[in-house]
Image (spheres, rainbow, N blue to C red):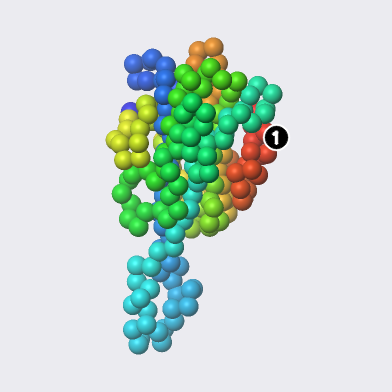
Amino acid sequence: MTMILNKGQSATVRKENGQPVMDITVGANWGKIDTLTNGLKTGVGFFDKLVGKATSAVGAKESVDLDLSVLTFDAQGNLVERCYFGNQRTKGDILVHTGDDRQGDDEDDGLDNERIQIRSLKLAQTTAQTAVIILNNFTQQPFEKIPYIRLGIYDGLFGLRDKAPRLLGFDLTGDKHFTGAKALILAKLVKTAQGWELVTIGEPTTDSSILEMQRRIQQNYL
């Protein structure tokens, strides 16, 4: 069963039988931008269509390079680890990234483009108190131009194409709250005596880099 959370809601991450989740995978799924949809704004004019020059534009797609990352922080708000396209495995394989997708989907296949595995038991043995899930756009198109952006949190450790039982789902598609945004602070996992608590943040930003997002998180969300 998938539970859909709204901005600011929190939930303890547990299995359907009530047992705590030991390992978590986070995934992001998105599509390329159909440049023909933005029409005739990009230089395909009426005369071009008449003489057939627009045929090469049919089905034209613009690549979208979204980057899924997880940043961990200690109780004082200091960065512990950063798992992203440039550091795909942290120490002890506590956080593991499946690889950088720089394109997006041509068609909506419902499959994630990137995933990050979080080994929660190992993470609990480090100084990390909080793990923050973020998404940013390296190619800098605003989110509303991207045909779909979906994120999921899954029960267990899964590769990119593995079928995974979803615990929580987030869908940014067509959400006006994210108009103009080029990045998202999605949620954070907070270490408690009962296990890891998931707190959704859902904060859109215009940050252009992971480092900018890290500073924002340290100032506002720890």
- Say which quadrant the C terminus sits in: top right
Q: Residue at x 37, y 29 (%)?
A: 157
The part of the image, by quadrant, that contains residue 57 is: bottom left
Residue 196 position in % (x across, y down): 50, 20
On the rendered structure, is 208 left or right of 49? right
98, above or below 124, in the image: below
On the rendered structure, is 127 left or right of 47? right
Residue 54 position in % (x across, y down): 37, 79
Secondary structure found at label 1? helix
82, above or below 147, in the image: above
In front of the other: 36 or 124: 124
Q: Residue furthest front?
A: 92
Residue 12 position in % (x across, y down): 48, 21
Q: Residue at x 65, y 21 (%)?
A: 75
Q: Residue at x 43, y 66 (%)?
A: 35
Residue 213 position in % (x across, y down): 62, 42
- Say which quadrant the N terminus sits in: top left
Residue 197 shows in this picture: no
Label 1: few (<14), some or many (≥20) within 10 Å?
Answer: few
Q: Amino acid at mark 1?
A: Gln
* Residue indicated by mark 1: 219
78, above or below 139, in the image: above
Residue 137 shows in this picture: yes
